[in-house]
Image (cartoon, helix red, strand yellow):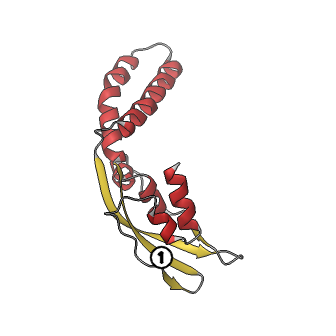
Amino acid sequence: MYIEGFLTAIQKSDVEKARTFVESDKEFNKLNEKTDDAEMKVKITSADLSVAVTKAVGEVMPMAFASAFSEDKEQSEKAIEKTMTSTIVKNLADKDAAMATREVTLNLKKNKDGDYKIVADDNLKEVLFANAKSLEKMFGRK
């Protein structure tokens, strides 16, 4: 899988290999090293999660209203959750999905073997899920 290969190359600080997983119009800047920490700016384009979720909410909302009068609330909630998840996945996989391009600085930390590893933080989340922050704001998180 390309994403796994890309992230593995980034983890190993192999910028040249990482470039092979990205279209030529994307840019990687050199590592900015400082002690055992480093930063790498990446410019990446992927499906926009906030658009996919917003569309899914619109599609699932009628089902949610109908289930408000259901006698089996637990079953209704499970059905809504399942439909919501499958709809988001469908929206993200759509060949006409809205795309988002963003420049993100990945934080890297050198491990005991001297290899850089990506720090699992909000910056990595932004690489993996375009515009996740706007969803958190929309749903009252953070």
Dividing the picture into quarters, in which one does residue 119 lie?
bottom right
**Residue in front for this viewpoint, 62 or 86:** 86
Question: Where the C terminus falls, by quadrant?
Answer: bottom left
Percent of width and height locating residue 62: 31, 22
Percent of width and height locating residue 43: 36, 65
**Above or below, comparing residue 112 to residue 86 in the picture:** below
| Res. 119 visible in picture | no
Task: Say which residue label 1 marks.
Answer: 39
Percent of width and height locating residue 56: 34, 33
For residue 25, side relative to residue 36 (left or right): left
Residue extending furthest toward the top? 71
**Above or below, comparing residue 132 to residue 16 in the picture:** above
Q: Identify which amino acid the numbered label 1 is placed on.
A: Glu
What residue sits 57% from the left and 66% below the top? 11
What count of labels does the image hold?
Answer: 1
For residue 113, side relative to residue 20 (left or right): right
Residue extending furthest toward the bottom? 35
What residue sits 34% from the left and 40% below the top? 52
Give the secondary structure at mark 1: strand
Dividing the picture into quarters, in which one does residue 66 lie?
top left
Residue extending furthest toward the right? 112
Percent of width and height locating residue 75: 52, 19
| Res. 19 visible in picture | yes
**Residue in front for this viewpoint, 45 or 85:** 45
What residue sits 48% from the left and 61% below the top? 124
